[in-house]
Image: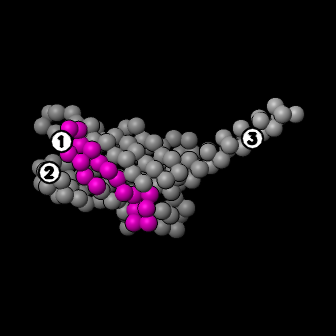
Amino acid sequence: MKTNLKTAGFAALTLAFAVSAWSAGQNIAGKWQAQFDSQIGVQKYTYEFKFDGTNYTGTASGTNDMMTNAVALQELTVTSNEVSFVEPLKFNDQEIRVEYKGTNTAEGIKFARKVGDFGNEEVVVTRAKDTDTNSPAAKP
């Protein structure tokens, strides 16, 4: 009997975690935008996150006075209120790892952005206006 209760408890905990992760994925799915000042000037970014029921994927496209960059995000992880990923950036023939770690807030997703060994920025991304705000995926 104790084994059955332990098994049922473990199954309930696993289900709760899966529902929490699913909700978080639905929460960030869609297009997000940011504009921020960095060591190389003002940057404008669009991030797009997709959730297919089990996997998270994403892209980032950014522009500044020096370049345009569009990449698939790597190491994308979503939990109940945190998002993290890596943007592989190529700058002057050099690969730079840009690490993001963010938290859902009332204003959007607030990220700490670490650009290789070059610098750090705080970035708040907000849902893009062209995202369908009536869908469950569009609610922050």
> Which tag, 1 or 3, sits closer to the chain's start?
3
Residue at screen point 37% across, 62% down: 126
- Please provide the residue range marked out in magenta: 104-122
Q: Residue furthest right?
A: 1
Name the element at disc 2.
loop
Q: In the displayed orientation, state which residue is furthest to the front.
A: 2
Q: Which residue does the image show at 56% across and 41% down from the upper left?
A: 54
* Residue 44 at least partly seen: yes
| Magenta stretch prevailing secondary structure | strand
- As drawn, 3 above or below 82: above
Q: Quadrant of the N terminus?
A: top right
The residue indicated by pointer 3 is 9
Along the horizontal axis of the image, is 91 left or right of 79? Answer: left
Measure how far apart labels 2 and 1 are at the Cα level: 8 Å
Q: Measured along the vertical axis of the image, is residue 62 above or below residue 135?
A: above
Residue 94 position by quadrant: top left
Q: Position of residue 74 (x, y in %)?
A: 37, 38
Q: State the separation of the CA atoms marked 1 and 3.
A: 47 Å
Amino acid at pointer 3: Gly
* Marks 3, 2: nearer the viewer: 3
Residue plotted at (65% across, 47% down): 16
Compared across the picture, whether 1 is left or right of 81 comes to right
- Judge whether residue 121 is colored magenta: yes
Crowding at mark 1 (Cα within 10 Å: few <14, some 14-19, many 20+): few
> Residue tagged by mark 2?
39
Q: Secondary structure at mark 1?
A: loop
**Quadrant location of residue 73?**
top left
